[in-house]
Image (tube, coloured by chain):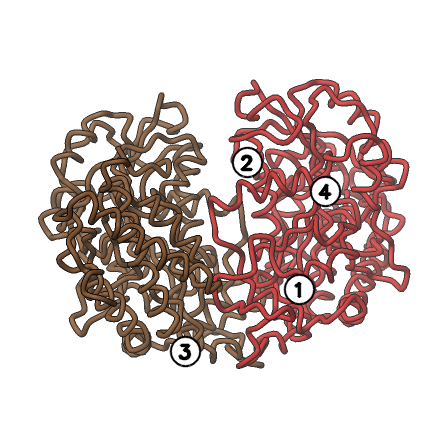
Chain colours: A red, B brown
């Protein structure tokens, strides 16, 4: 790209800006004419990544449906809580004792949803009753955050209250203020390599969330540790030991911990986990038995045979890192080459997880997404990372870099940065106001 | 067994009865001393039955995670509704067009639960609103019926209203009377080889349920066709085409149809189905997308590869029949040998499904279950087939014959019939009153 492409548009005269806008618009028209079909929208593993677990597709194997303890998992056996061996394997991953961990179906989102539904219908341990009896029950959302978390609340009639995400996690002062209100019953958290910012909550933030007084005696953290082992560098950021920390802070039942193998083995055909205090786990199982005889334990056995042990998980995740770290590096490189010094955007350089967070000039994000779409580059809708899909500053979007092959990602990123610069030029033009 | 064992106790004098009671009690004590551990409690397939699907455990196989249409089912692909090929295969099994069928997780019970939850929280198409806003919302239960159906209502605060089960299905007059009340929103049905009576609903009963006027405009049948292909004889009882019948009767949205492969392939690791009208399916999917990205499509692909087509399902079910029909025959033979002509019990001779229904002398069922338990023969709790676990006449229990090997089943049935006769003798003794 030319040097002018990296100009700081804020330094230009109106005429220069108009000329630059026209030049970028022409470039965009050429791009659009190429008829690309590139996707940076959702956090999907690539084909090479799911290939890493292809062995799963032939497991546990004929004659191997019986578990280590002699249980025949081809029948209605093994209990509600899921395969003990697999729970033992994931206990250290999620920082939850195996007997306080439930291995259920293929979706951690479904477990989060179910915990909200059970809380609405029945209430949770230590609470005064069903949450549906609370007028205007509300959850806290650190923004930007994970759209599917917020959508559960919208689906179930729970108000979402935003707090800013900082480089150390949710803004604790803002959280403290909100949780004083007893109608605030929950908070969404992605504590490690957060979606989409990549931020890992600092220890003092975790301590504050664990220990803060809350108006509701039954306030809960929905602690979605989706990326616990999804490191992008050799430094493996440790996850906070949230159950120990909440217990030490005098709130042993405060956190529901979630995780899954969706981005470890196969996406959508993995195993999801829920861990919590004994009281919360007993509560969940007590209700779970009314809806099912038990989870798919053959799939759990399949995963146990494939991953083996904690070293097996770590070795497997290292293979993922080899595949996706170059993609994150490419995204960062193109962003730097095309946007560094321009004032057009800031972006994250995550050490794990699945996303690069981008903040552009205020009022430009929706236009960037629109321009990218016209150029055949799919992004999540602007505002997707905010409750109700509304980004008040219209400046945020995220890049999901894992799925496309490197050459496609390169093309998509050059196209995307062009859209960012064009949107910026349009926005800065006086006629825009 | 001796001829006296088959005496009709109602013809004995009090002294003869006391002597017989003592003789049977001695026999029971001897049995209890043998320390048996036999189980007739739950409808579980046997190990030989799940062996029939052992090939599943190595499917779809390495390099075979891509579906017939090119979709990579190892990734987040394939949509909410489940694998099209598997839906096409089960469409004729359940009498639901493939595009009105959803293939979801491993448990049809979970789908039934979810439909109730969605109805409570959001209401159903054509209704005035969420069912939780209805005072004392109620469902109809034909008794004896399936305990897990009733438990869902108890868990979710829905009142259960009983109607008698006849040889042709639920007592339609009793149903008509109850559904006039607008708070009656649903009814549990197992239309083919019903649990536990084995009754298949007669066509006029189905017509009546499909066409009857209801006080609630959004009344629904929870049509659990769990045993659609689970024939015990060469005559394959056809399932009613419930969606066509309700549509023809002017109530196209009246039925939610459920089924699963739990007792076709592997129990607890199969695929469950929900079928209904387009409006109901759209409604379900519209809410489903908030709780999950999609079902485990690899397991669906696995099932499609294993079963192949409808002939594959029929051939597979014939193998099940070969294994379990002799067990049902054995149960019937021992019941006839030990109880025919005694007035102690009546029982069903089902042509499909998983259970033999037994009705003993009133006031005896709980005692039979207790005596059997002391003799090491596990049965479901007396009254389990009735709402709230309460059999008003205390006369019903069911026999689940599929799991034990034939020799164990023989021992269990001889022990059980002894318990029936002992309970009868105790009950008929004048001192009992």
* Residue at mark 2: A118
Pointer 3 chain: B
Checking the image for residue A223, the label placed there is 4
Number of the front mark, 3 or 2 = 3
Front-most of residues B259 and A17: B259
> The residue tagged with tag 2: helix, strand or loop?
helix
Image quarter of residue A161? top right
Front-most of residues B144 and B381: B381
* Residue at mark 1: A45
First in residue order: circle 1 vs circle 2: 1
Dot 2 alpha-carbon crowd within 10 angstroms: few under 14, some 14 to 19, many 20 or more: some
Dot 3 alpha-carbon crowd within 10 angstroms: few under 14, some 14 to 19, many 20 or more: some
**Could you give the CA–CA distance between mark 4 and mark 1, rounded to whole angstroms?**
22 Å
Q: Residue at x 30, y 38 (%)?
A: B391
> The residue tagged with tag 3: helix, strand or loop?
loop
* Residue at mark 3: B52
Q: Residue at x 52, y 36 (%)?
A: A155
Say left or right for B114 vs A166.
left
Say left or right for B33 vs A324.
left
Say left or right for A158 vs B405.
right
Q: Are marks 4 and 3 in contact (CB under 8 Å)?
A: no
Q: Are marks 4 and 2 in contact (CB under 8 Å)?
A: no
**Could you give the CA–CA distance between mark 4 and mark 3, rounded to whole angstroms?**
42 Å
> The residue tagged with tag 1: helix, strand or loop?
loop
Pointer 4 chain: A
């Amino acid at each position: 790209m030319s040097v002018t492409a990296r100009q700081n548009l804020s330094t230009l005269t109106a005429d220069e800006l108009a000329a630059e806008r026209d030049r970028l618009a022409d470039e965009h028209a050429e791009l659009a004419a190429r008829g690309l079909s590139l996707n940076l929208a959702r956090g999907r593993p690539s084909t090479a990544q799911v290939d890493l677990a292809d062995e799963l597709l032939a497991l546990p194997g004929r004659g191997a449906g019986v578990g280590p303890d002699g249980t025949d998992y081809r029948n209605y056996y093994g209990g509600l809580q899921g395969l003990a061996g697999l729970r033992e394997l994931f206990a250290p991953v999620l920082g939850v004792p195996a007997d306080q961990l439930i291995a259920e179906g293929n979706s951690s989102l479904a477990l989060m949803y179910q915990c909200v539904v059970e809380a609405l219908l029945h209430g949770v341990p230590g609470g005064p009753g069903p949450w549906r009896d609370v007028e205007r029950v509300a959850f806290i959302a650190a923004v930007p955050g994970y759209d599917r978390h917020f959508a559960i609340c919208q689906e179930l009639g729970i108000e979402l209250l935003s707090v800013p995400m900082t480089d150390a996690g949710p803004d604790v002062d803002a959280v403290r203020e909100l949780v004083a209100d007893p109608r605030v019953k929950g908070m969404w958290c992605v504590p490690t390599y957060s979606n989409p910012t990549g931020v890992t909550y600092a220890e003092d933030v975790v301590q504050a969330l664990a220990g803060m007084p809350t108006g509701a005696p039954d306030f809960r953290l929905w602690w979605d540790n989706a990326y616990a082992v999804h490191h992008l560098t050799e430094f493996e950021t440790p996850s906070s030991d949230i159950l120990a920390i909440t217990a030490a802070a005098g709130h042993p039942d405060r956190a529901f911990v979630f995780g899954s193998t969706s981005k470890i083995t196969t996406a959508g055909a993995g195993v999801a986990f829920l861990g919590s205090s004994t009281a919360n786990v007993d509560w969940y199982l007590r209700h779970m038995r009314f809806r099912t005889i038990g989870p798919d334990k053959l799939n759990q056995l399949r995963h146990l045979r494939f991953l083996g042990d904690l070293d097996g998980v770590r070795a497997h995740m290292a293979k993922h890192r080899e595949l996706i770290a170059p993609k994150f590096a490419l995204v960062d490189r193109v962003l730097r080459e095309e946007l560094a010094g321009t004032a057009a955007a800031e972006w994250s350089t995550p050490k794990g997880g699945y996303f690069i967070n981008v903040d552009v000039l205020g009022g430009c994000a929706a236009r960037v997404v629109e321009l990218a779409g016209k150029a055949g580059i799919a992004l999540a809708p602007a505002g997707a990372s905010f409750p109700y899909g509304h980004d008040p500053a219209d400046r945020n979007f995220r890049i999901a870099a894992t799925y496309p092959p490197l050459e496609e990602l390169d093309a998509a990123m050059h196209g995307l940065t062009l859209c960012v610069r064009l949107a910026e030029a349009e926005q800065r033009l006086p006629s825009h106001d």
